[in-house]
Each structure stands twice: as C-alpha cells, then as structure tokens.
Image: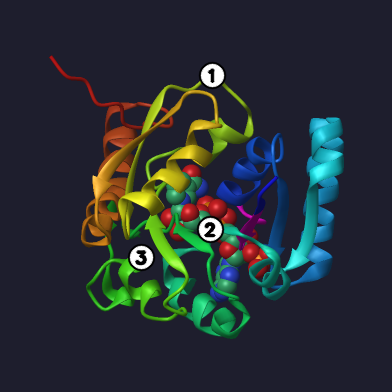
C-alpha cells in the first residue's frame, strides 16, 4: 500500500482524487490548517459512507503529508504553487514522486487564458523541479480532468496526458492514474512537455463555456 499525499488537498481536485485513491492506498489529505482538513475529511467520510474511506483517508498539515508520503500530488491554485512548494522544500525526504496537477489558467472578463506568469514563463512542473531535492521525481498530470465529475464518481472516459522526468516516473504515475476507472494514462514525454498540458485547461474551459459543454475533457482517437 502506497502512501499518497495531496498537498492542498482540501479543494475540488484534492478531495476528488482522495475519494478514488483511498480505495487502494493510505491517502493523506493535506492543508495549511489542520482544523480545516479534519473537517473536510469528516465531511467526505459522512457523505461517501464507505469503509475504505473511513480506514484509509487521513487529515494532516501539508508539512506532515510531504514527510510521510511516497507519492505526492500538488493540488493548489497556480498562483500559490511556487510559494507552497518553497515552504515545504525542507520536508521532502527524497525518493518520492511529486505530480503537479497545476494548470496555467486564469480568467480575464468572461474568457479563460493561459497564465504562466507566476511560473516565470516555464511550466509550473519545471519550476517546482528546481525547488525540491534532486531525488524527488516530478511529473505533470490531471490538468484536463474535471474534479466535479471525479468527486461525484460519475462515469468518465478521459485521457490523462502525463509529462515526466523519465519513462520510469511516467510508469509510476500511469499506474496510479489507471486505478481510477475510466482514466487512460498517455505518455506525453519529458518534463519539457509539461507546459503543453498545463495550457490545455484554458482551451477546455473556453470550449465548454462557449459551446454549452458541461465539464469537458479530452479523449484522443486514432484511425
Ligand atoms: N478543479 C478542477 O476541476 C481541476 C482540474 C484539473 C486541474 N486543476 C488544478 O488543480 C489545482 C487545484 O484545483 P482546485 O480547483 O482543487 O483548487 P482550489 O479548490 O481553489 O484550491 C485547492 C486548495 O489550495 C489551497 N490553497 C488556497 N490558497 C492557497 C495559498 N494562498 N497558499 C497555499 N495553498 C492554498 C487550499 O487548501 P488549504 O486552505 O486547506 O491549505 C485549497 O483548498 C489548480 O492548480 C487547478 O488548476 C483543477
């Protein structure tokens, strides 16, 4: 059983991933505030009413989550990604995988736009790579998955493009992604590709909003 940690896990994406990943793993839901995350875990336990969630889902401060997890997922807003990882940099113990789910999306008037400004114009995943010990391996994934659909456990069929430091890192992330029914991991390439997937969210949200498509995601076809 892997310990999966969700940094900033109290939001939409963190709670959605926690519901699915606690089927097979110990899941530590992280927050800056212990009281807040305890209350969020309590709400999930009551709402979902499943034994595995009661047994496997724990509340913790982000610092504890980073110290204790083998596999971490960063689920904070993009404006806070750099600051959050900087403040946790001393808590990493190495030989961990850190997946950034951070999407480079901001809103201007009624449109979504790509916003890489706070990552200094390289991808958030590459920025984060520079902040953690070398032994922590980085990937980017989940940017195109609508959290509300996952949380409600609606039927989903979606692809999850994954950029990772190496094929081995991709394989580890792909194995976690495949545990969520309906998600298909796809190898996008090295961390240099992370920006491509981080930018897709603005496209999806605009297509959804302007064409009346609820919770759009991506699914590749080939002929
Ligand atoms: N929502 C989606 O459907 C979706 C899908 C794919 C990717 N994403 C990406 O995943 C990330 C999380 O999305 P979300 O919708 O779950 O976000 P969210 O609900 O807005 O925020 C997630 C958590 O981030 C923490 N946070 C907020 N402000 C912070 C700050 N100033 N410093 C540190 N932590 C802060 C909060 O946790 P605490 O207050 O408990 O610390 C909050 O519960 C984003 O980067 C988003 O682009 C989202």
Q: How is the image coloured?
A: rainbow
Mark 2–mark 3 CB contact (< 8 Å): no
Disc 2 within 8 angstroms of ligand 1 (CB): yes
Residue pictured at 69% horizontal, 63% vertical: 30
Q: Return the residue nearer the eye: 87 or 56.
A: 56
Q: Quadrant of residue 187?
A: top left
> Is residue 111 something one can see in this rendering?
no
What numbered label is drawn on residue 125? Answer: 3
Residue plotted at (40% across, 44% down)? 171
Q: Which residues are magenta?
A: 4-11
Where residue 120 appears, as percent x and y from the top left, is 26, 79
Frontmost of labels 1 and 3 is: 3
Mark nearer the N terminus (1 vs 2): 2
Task: Looking at this view, name the residue that lies furthest to the left.
Answer: 223
Q: Give the distance between the C-alpha atoms of the residues marked 1 and 2, in whole angstroms.
A: 22 Å
Q: Quadrant of ligand 1?
A: bottom right
Callout 3: helix, strand or loop? helix
Tell which circle, 2 or 3, labels the residue nearer the N-terminal end.
2
Badge 1 is on which residue?
155
Look at the image and tell me whether residue 155 can be seen: yes
Q: Quadrant of the C terminus?
A: top left
Above or below for 92 versus 207 = below
Q: Calculate the distance from the C-alpha at mark 2 to the C-alpha at mark 3.
A: 12 Å
Picture layout, residue 32 above or below residue 37? below
Q: Quadrant of the N terminus?
A: top right
Location of mark 2 (residue) = 75
Q: Is residue 170 above or below residue 91?
A: above
Q: How many marks?
A: 3
Q: Is residue 94 magenta?
A: no
- The nearer-to-camera label among 2 and 3 is 3
């Amino acid at each position: 059983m892997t310990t999966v940690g969700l940094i900033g896990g109290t939001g939409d994406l963190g709670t959605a991933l926690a519901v699915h990943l606690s089927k097979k793993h110990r899941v530590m839901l992280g927050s800056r505030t212990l009281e807040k995350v305890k209350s969020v875990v309590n709400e999930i336990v009551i709402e979902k009413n499943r034994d595995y969630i009661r047994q496997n889902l724990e509340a913790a401060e982000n610092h504890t989550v980073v110290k204790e997890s083998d596999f971490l997922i960063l689920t904070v807003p993009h404006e806070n990604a750099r600051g959050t990882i900087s403040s946790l940099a001393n808590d990493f113990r190495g030989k961990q995988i850190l997946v950034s789910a951070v999407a480079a999306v901001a809103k201007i008037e009624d449109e979504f736009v790509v916003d890489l400004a706070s990552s200094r114009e390289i991808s958030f995943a590459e920025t984060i790579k520079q902040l953690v010990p070398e032994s922590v391996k980085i990937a980017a994934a989940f940017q195109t998955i609508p959290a509300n659909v996952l949380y409600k456990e609606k039927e989903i069929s979606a692809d999850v493009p994954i950029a990772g430091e190496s094929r081995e890192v991709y394989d580890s992330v792909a194995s976690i992604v495949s545990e969520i029914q309906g998600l298909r991991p796809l190898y996008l390439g090295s961390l240099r590709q992370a920006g491509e997937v981080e930018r897709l969210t603005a496209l999806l949200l605009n297509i959804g909003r302007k064409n009346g498509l609820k919770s759009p995601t991506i699914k590749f076809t080939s002929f």
